[in-house]
Amino acid sequence: MSPMPQTRGGKTAPASNLYTVILAIAFAVVLVTFAYVVYACKAQYGVFLGVP
Amino acid sequence: MSTLTKVLIVLLTVFSLFLCGIVVTYVANAENQRKRADTLQQQLQSAKQKQQAAMEGEAQQKQEAEALKADLGKQLADLTTLRTQLEGEIDRLKRDNSQKEQEARDASARATLATETSSKMTDQATAAQNEVKDLQANLTNIEKELQETTQALMERMAVLSDLEKRNRQITEEKQGLETQLNQVLQQYGRAPLRPPTVTAPRTTAQPMTQAPQTPTREISLNGRVTQVDMKSRLAAISIGSAGGVRRDMKFHVTRGDRFVCDIVISDVDADKAIGSLDLVQIDPQPGDSATTNL
């Protein structure tokens, strides 16, 4: 297996959609967690960063 | 895609899920520090207000305590002064009480002495009344005797008057008889012979010769014992100066054939005499016979 992605018909094709989905889920989870943390900070202290 | 990349993707995903889970759990369970800080701030303000109020109350109570202390000090001073005055009053009352008790004892002693004096004066008054009664009885007896003596004297004066009257009559008869006798004798030339007088003629003074002394006999006086006082050893008898009793006479008291005592007369009245007892053999009683000669 080559470390570079293989191109088919001039388009870039992922090596494996499965792992792409996994990465997307991980990213989504991290993003949702970040959003929840921001919401919680705004709700409790009014600011996200800094001293209230 | 290499295997290492796949493994890393899987691990990254797993760790991301794990870490996100931990973060979500922590944030969900984390305490609201702002709310807590507000609560603590409010509690701090409340505590400060309470402290201020407590300090103000303490200051006020301290002022009140000071005022109360000053008041109590003043009251204590007043009470101390009052106590001193009351102690002085108590001492004065004690002195007055002891003085009153002494006066009461003196008054009681005076009352007792007055009672005793009154009793003695009553006894003396009773004795004086009895003596007055005795003197009145004696006076009555003396008046009675005086009346009897006066009556006897009047009778004797009447008898004497009668005798003088008879004497004059006899003298007149005698003179008449002498006159008749002289007339008869003159007829016969004789003179009458004067009868010898009864009175002896006077002679010259001669030495007095001792006349033979005729034997005399003492008169026996008899009476009765009327009163006896063994305390003072005195007795009274029923005859007095009218019966011939004189001071220092000795009467022998007998009861039947028994000798009782002697009475030496010390005071004599008209109808009674009083003397002291002597040689007492048995106690004399009223009714015992008293005589000067046994």
Image (spheres, coloured by chain):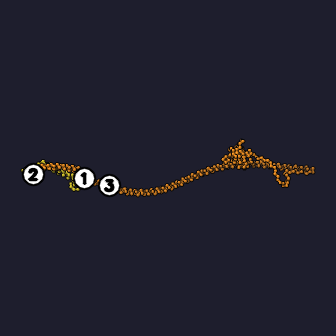
Chain colours: A yellow, B orange
Q: Which percent across, then down, holds residue B278?
A: 70, 47
Query: Which residue has dot 3 on it?
Result: B50
Disc 1 residue type? Gln
The amino acid type of the residue labelled 2 equals Met
Relative to B22, is A17 on the left or the right?
A: left
Q: Front-most of B173 and B259?
A: B259
Q: Chain of mark 1?
A: B
Question: Does the image show residue B225?
Answer: no
Mark 1 or 3, nearer chain start: 1
Q: CA distance from mark 1 to mark 3?
A: 25 Å
* Label 1 crowd (10 A; few <14 / some 14-19 / many >=20): few
Residue B38 in the image: x percent, y percent? 26, 54
Secondary structure of the residue carrying tag 1 is helix
**Does residue B99 show up?**
yes
The numbered dot on residue A4 is 2
Q: Are marks 3 and 2 in contact (CB under 8 Å)?
A: no
- Horizontal placement of B186 versus B1: left or right? right
User: Which of the numbered marks, if any, corresponds to residue B122?
Assistant: none
Q: Is residue B60 above or below residue B215?
A: below
Other-residue count near label 3 (Cα within 10 Å), few / some / many at <14 / 14–19 / ≥20: few
Chain at tag 3? B
- For mark 1, what is the residue? B33
Identify the chain of the residue marked 2, using the numbered disc in the image.
A
Q: Secondary structure at mark 3?
A: helix
Q: CA distance from mark 3 to mark 2?
A: 75 Å
On the image, the x and y values in percent for residue B258 come to 71, 42
- Camera-side residue: B287 or B140? B287
Distance, label 2 to label 1, CA atoms, is 51 Å
> Which quadrant is home to the C terminus of chain B?
top right
Label 3 is placed on what type of residue? Lys
